[in-house]
Image (cartoon, rainbow, N blue to C red):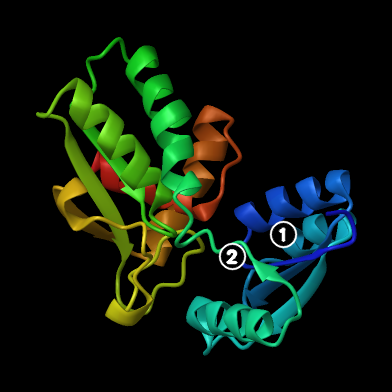
Amino acid sequence: RPGDTLIEATSGNTGIALAMAAAIRGYRMVLIMPANQSEERRQAMTAYGAEIISVSAAQGMEGARDLAKQMEREGKGRVLDQFANPDNPAAHYMATGPEIWRDTDGTITHFVSCMGTTGTIMGVSRFLKEKNPAVQVVGLQPTDGSSIPGIRRWPAEYLPKIFERPRVDRFERVSQADAEEMTRRLAREEGIFAGISSGGALHAALR
């Protein structure tokens, strides 16, 4: 209800969307982020009135998720938990998957997707495989030492509950340098100003 407190660990995009929705609905929004995430994302969230709590870069998203759950246990609000919420992949099953199928006239052969919460790859994979089981679904993970918001390789104990391994045919890895360079190319050559995870996905798809 208006006035209630919602809590979420985020690296950016979901946090911005939640901050916007909370402003419209009259909720207090507390977002927990690693300290090394971009200042632009923080500014967008705070512009919508969200409160930002930072954990160290070393704690990362794992630490942010732990703190969110701790705050919920202490009665400080309700965690939405995009990592376990079935509405996350369901949204991509109902919207993203059909859009891709429609816009490619059903000719898609491969789907390369970043793996953050894994909601996108889970929902789209389910839809595309129902349309054509031969479509290859490729999950994108970072190389060792790379830090790319939206592209994760989770430790087993933090693997999102919505993730189902059989829905991914294989995995590819991308470096931070390659993701950043492709992001610059995407803006320079195509006029698309996207984030680093998009650059990483495009690099892997072209490779």
- Residue drawn where x is 41% and y is 65% of the image: 176
Q: Quadrant of the N terminus?
A: bottom right
Q: Is residue 182 something one can see in this rendering?
A: no
- Residue drawn where x is 24% and y is 22% of the image: 108
Q: Indicate which disc residue 162 carries.
A: none
Q: Is residue 183 above or below residue 173?
A: above
As drawn, is 58 to the left or to the right of 54? left
Q: Secondary structure at mark 1?
A: helix
Q: Are marks 2 and 1 in contact (CB under 8 Å)?
A: yes
Amino acid type shown at disc 1:
Arg
Residue 165 rendering spot, x and y as whole percentages: 19, 57
As drawn, is 12 to the left or to the right of 103? right
Circle 1 is placed at which residue position? 41
Amino acid type shown at disc 2:
Ser
- Residue drawn where x is 63% and y is 59% of the image: 12
Residue 75 rendering spot, x and y as whole percentages: 73, 82
The quadrant holding residue 36 is: bottom right
